[in-house]
């Protein structure tokens, strides 16, 4: 039995390596001259998950970076706003969910340690225990359901959120395991509609709204472009404590819109930069995610059909079609039935966490 398991693991690793080679070749090859601009050469294995030495920077800094606005996010209050309609929001969330969870069943109950130095990845948007956003979801949810078993994990989530960024302790899940974090998250997602709505509320405030502002700042206004920016900010973040991989870094390396450059052509450069970053990264987790950008690039190629996101889209690398008619409020993959009391639960418009004090952490 053991040798069969070993064979399956080996085969899985071979498949992942083959997929990485498929999407990280040619102008996206790992280690090519195009990788120099990302300055990944000096990144050591230790730095990938941070030093365990736990260097101290005081209460007002994170990994040596001064906290200017009480959050780990850039202050984007000066960036322009733009709206996103409900259908486009749904399509964007479904597309990203395919990339994050493998299908159109929204992964509210998904919990896994994918070994990306961020602890547990949880929920529909991939909230992580090592980057404060899972803590934010749990904290907001307990305001509505203080008796949830997730309360047992709150103290540990808070402790993790107070560690220096760059400290490998942020990837630690041992105490969360003792408190039953995984089962508590899954139970809340499968039985309480309020927890689903809390995930959506925090996701909109922490990622959807900022994505729209960043898109507007470079003149991206199409529905397809908005979906691209949403997917990018979900995967790469916009926290200044991850400056090598975040959305602002991708925008910087892509460069400003050129004179008379169409939105389609700008988005092509943007996605090329993003995919090269994934493939050039010293982390295999990033290399293996280049397939999602390959799918976005294919959607961009058929600009006239897809720019408004009014039609179903096929994500070839994942073999999934997104129609826009799927049920957003039920995780059929991780739950056996729909959560109760969904009719009385309404969205809460939470603010973007880029000001002091952080409105989502209070």
Image: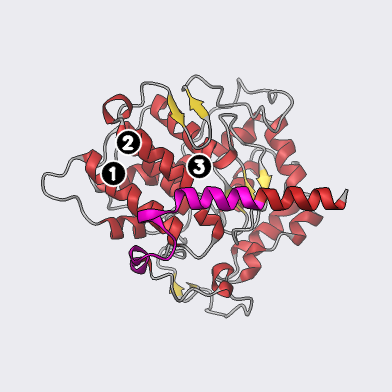
According to the image, label 1 marks what residue? 267
When asked about the image quadrant of residue 302, the answer is top left
Q: Nearer the viewer, residue 343 or 180?
A: 180
Residue 21 magenta-highlighted: yes
Q: Is residue 138 left or right of residue 328?
A: right
Residue named by callout 3: 203
Instruction: Residue lying at the far right in this picture: please name it.
Output: 1
Span shown in magenta? 13-37
Mark 2 or mark 1: which comes first in sequence?
1
Q: Residue furthest left?
A: 259
Residue drawn 67% across and 53% down? 113
In the rendered image, residue 287 lying in the magenta stretch gets the answer: no
In percent of width and height, residue 80 lies at: 26, 46
Circle 2 residues within 10 Å: few <14, some 14–19, many ≥20: many
- The residue pinned by badge 2 equals 300
Is residue 148 or residue 185 the one in the foreground? 185
Residue 161, image x and y in percent?
Answer: 60, 62
User: Where residue 46 is drawn, which disc sits there?
Assistant: none
Q: Quadrant of residue 41?
A: bottom left
Q: CA distance from mark 2 to mark 1?
A: 8 Å
Question: Relative to 55, is 174 above or below?
Answer: above
Mark 3 vs mark 2: which is more N-terminal?
A: 3
Instruction: Identify the main secondary structure in magenta.
Output: helix
Picture layout, residue 230 above or below residue 172: above
Q: Horizontal and vertical percent for residue 128?
A: 60, 52
Task: Classify 330 as above or below 264.
Answer: above
311 relative to 182 in the view: left or right: left
Q: Dot 2 lies on which element?
A: helix
Tell me: residue 305, above or below residue 185: above
Q: How is the image coloured?
A: secondary structure
């Amino acid at each position: 039995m053991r040798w069969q398991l070993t064979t399956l693991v080996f085969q899985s690793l071979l498949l992942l390596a083959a997929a990485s080679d498929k999407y990280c070749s040619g102008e996206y090859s790992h280690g090519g001259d195009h990788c120099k601009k990302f300055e990944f050469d000096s990144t050591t294995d230790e730095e990938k998950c941070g030093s365990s030495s736990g260097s101290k920077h005081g209460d007002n800094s994170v990994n040596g970076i001064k906290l200017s606005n009480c959050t780990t996010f850039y202050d984007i209050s000066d960036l322009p706003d733009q709206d996103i309609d409900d259908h486009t929001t749904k399509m964007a969330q479904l597309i990203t969910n395919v990339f994050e969870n493998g299908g159109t069943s929204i992964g509210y109950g998904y919990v896994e340690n994918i070994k990306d130095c961020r602890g547990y990845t949880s929920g529909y948007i991939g909230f992580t225990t090592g980057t404060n956003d899972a803590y934010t979801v749990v904290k907001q949810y307990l305001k509505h359901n203080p008796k949830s078993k997730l309360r047992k994990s709150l103290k540990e989530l808070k402790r993790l959120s107070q560690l220096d960024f760059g400290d490998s302790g942020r990837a630690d899940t041992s105490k969360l395991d003792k408190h039953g974090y995984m089962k508590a998250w899954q139970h809340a997602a499968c039985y309480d509609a309020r927890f689903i709505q809390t995930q959506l509320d925090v996701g909109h405030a922490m990622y959807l709204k900022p994505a729209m502002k960043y898109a507007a700042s470079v003149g991206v206004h199409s529905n397809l472009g908005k979906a691209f920016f949403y997917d990018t900010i979900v995967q790469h973040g916009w926290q200044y404590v991850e400056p090598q991989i975040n959305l602002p870094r991708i925008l910087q390396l892509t460069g400003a819109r050129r004179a008379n450059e169409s939105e389609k052509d700008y988005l092509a450069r943007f996605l090329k930069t993003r995919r090269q970053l994934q493939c050039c990264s010293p982390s295999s987790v990033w290399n293996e995610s280049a397939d999602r950008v390959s799918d976005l690039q294919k959607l961009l190629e058929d600009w006239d059909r897809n720019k408004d996101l009014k039609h179903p889209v096929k994500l070839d690398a994942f073999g999934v079609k997104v129609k826009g008619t799927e049920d957003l409020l039920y995780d059929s993959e991780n739950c056996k039935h729909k959560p109760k009391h969904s009719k009385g639960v309404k969205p809460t418009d939470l603010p973007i966490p880029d000001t002091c004090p952080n409105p989502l952490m209070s």
